[in-house]
Amino acid sequence: MNQKIKNTARIGYALLVFAVLCAPVSVLAIQSINPDTDETGNAENRVLAEFPSMHLEDGSLNKDITTQFEAWFSEHFGLRGNLVTAYGDLTRNVFSVSTEKDVIIGANDWLYYTPTIPDATGVRTLSDTEIRHMVHNLELVNSYAASKGTRLIFAPAPNKASIYPEYLPKRYLHTGEKNNLDAFCEELGKTGITLCDWRSGLRDAAVQPGARQLYHKTDTHWNGDGAMLGYQMLMQSAGLDDLGFAQTERTETADWEGDLWKMLSPSRKNPDQNAVYAVPQTYKTRDRMRSIDDLTIQTDCAERDGSLLMFRDSFGRALIPLLAERFASCSFYRASAVPVDQLENEHADFLVYELIERNLEQLIKYAPRMPAPAAELPAEPQPVADISPLQVSMKKDPVYLHCCGLYDPQFSDSEAVFVRLCGADNQQTFEAFRCCEPDILELDTHCANGFSLYIPLVAVPENARIQVIGKTADGFVLLGEAQVETVA
């Protein structure tokens, strides 16, 4: 009898183990039949791996299919969100340790995004040369905007850790040195470009006695109160009336799903507090808007005046309803290569360029999409001996020839870089942005010896060659030459 009970127990245990092992695959099969039951894709704050294809776009066999399938399965197997959540709850509650490398658990349930730590501790990740290139690029944008009667306002949105460093774990000590944004603002101050200094305003407001919380505890972004203060400061930088939106009725909700929390516990909700202001919503969108995260949003408000063009990232999302209600017309764009040339098609009184502090380096990674500024050189460039080969990539679209590349790094600190188009009968010279275009050039990170520009196709002669020219303290030097490619 005892042996029979033991055998039954062993069989039951084996069946239980088998059921546990089969559960993730079974749930995955159900999800494949009914995709609506799969919450993995929208629970985590990142793009998950896609199911691999047997063949590549050119029809050849995909040799990496096994590796890609392994990555897809590891991110989509059934009950993954529940298991990640359970493991995250255990390590967080018992050991106060984060299971996600990009999430830091701070005091009083505050969560922080790991890539913002260098900014919070005063660690520079951008060189002085790169900082100067960033400001130089903004000056080119500012000159173009001014030629269209538009005023540029650059608005770097502060990381949460820059406003609330007191809740970071004690192991993150400040070096006492300037960080990237400090160095950038100091260099930008030498120009006439308007800076909306959200960081100082938000930080001053956050430390006032009885101050309202301005950022979400479980999210990387500011909350409704922070966004409202940001809006007021932006209007002050523009010299405009904020129309008293902050004095409208304010209510508090508990329905905000934090992006950092989703990374730790994708299957368990933990709604954060948020502030909602009863600002009128009389504006209309020109086209059907699917969500506030659309790449392009254009609005009209009949009761207002003035026009705005804004380049924004996720921090600008909370500002859209406020700005759309403040201006007669607004255009909001979300893109790596910001489309400054929209000023060719529509006038804007103000161009607001918002960029999160941790992504300042995008100013030297992606050239703005706009006609390259024409230039005239007062002297001919001189050849340089023992120079490394020029790396160039060119691509044509219906409007531009996008030319980008890398030149010898010993000339990274050049005052300016120019691209000259040499045709059979004439030549034209354009100033380039100091950008490295890592996606196109297949770089792992940004570098200081890159150039990029958009040349209008009407200015590109047939069978042209390009010369890349650097302006140094000793004059103009020829950094390399290449034939203009005819790729589409």
Image: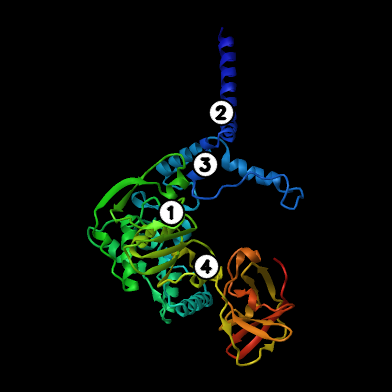
Q: Are marks 3 and 1 in contact (CB under 8 Å)?
A: no
Q: Position of residue 225 (x, y in %)?
A: 30, 57
Marks 3/2: CA–CA distance: 20 Å
Whether residue 451 is visible, yes or no, is: no
Sequence-wise first label, 4 or 3? 3
Marks 1/4: CA–CA distance: 19 Å
Sequence-wise first label, 1 or 4? 1
Residue that badge 1 annotates: 292
Q: Amino acid at mark 4?
A: Pro
Q: Amino acid at mark 3?
A: Thr
Q: Nearer the viewer, residue 83 or 132?
A: 132
Q: Is residue 46 above or below residue 398?
A: above
Return the mark for residue 339: 4
Q: Nearer the viewer, residue 384 or 302?
A: 302
Looking at the rendered image, the disc whose residue lies closer to the viewer, 3 or 2, is 3
Marks 4/2: CA–CA distance: 52 Å
Residue that badge 2 annotates: 20
Q: Secondary structure at mark 2?
A: helix
Residue that badge 3 annotates: 40
Q: Is residue 164 left or right of residue 334?
A: left
Q: Secondary structure at mark 4?
A: loop
Q: Is residue 471 left or right of residue 191?
A: right
Q: Amino acid at mark 1?
A: Ile
Residue, far right:
60
Looking at the rendered image, the disc whose residue lies closer to the viewer, 4 or 2, is 4
Q: Amino acid at mark 2?
A: Val
Sequence-wise first label, 1 or 2? 2
Marks 3/1: CA–CA distance: 21 Å
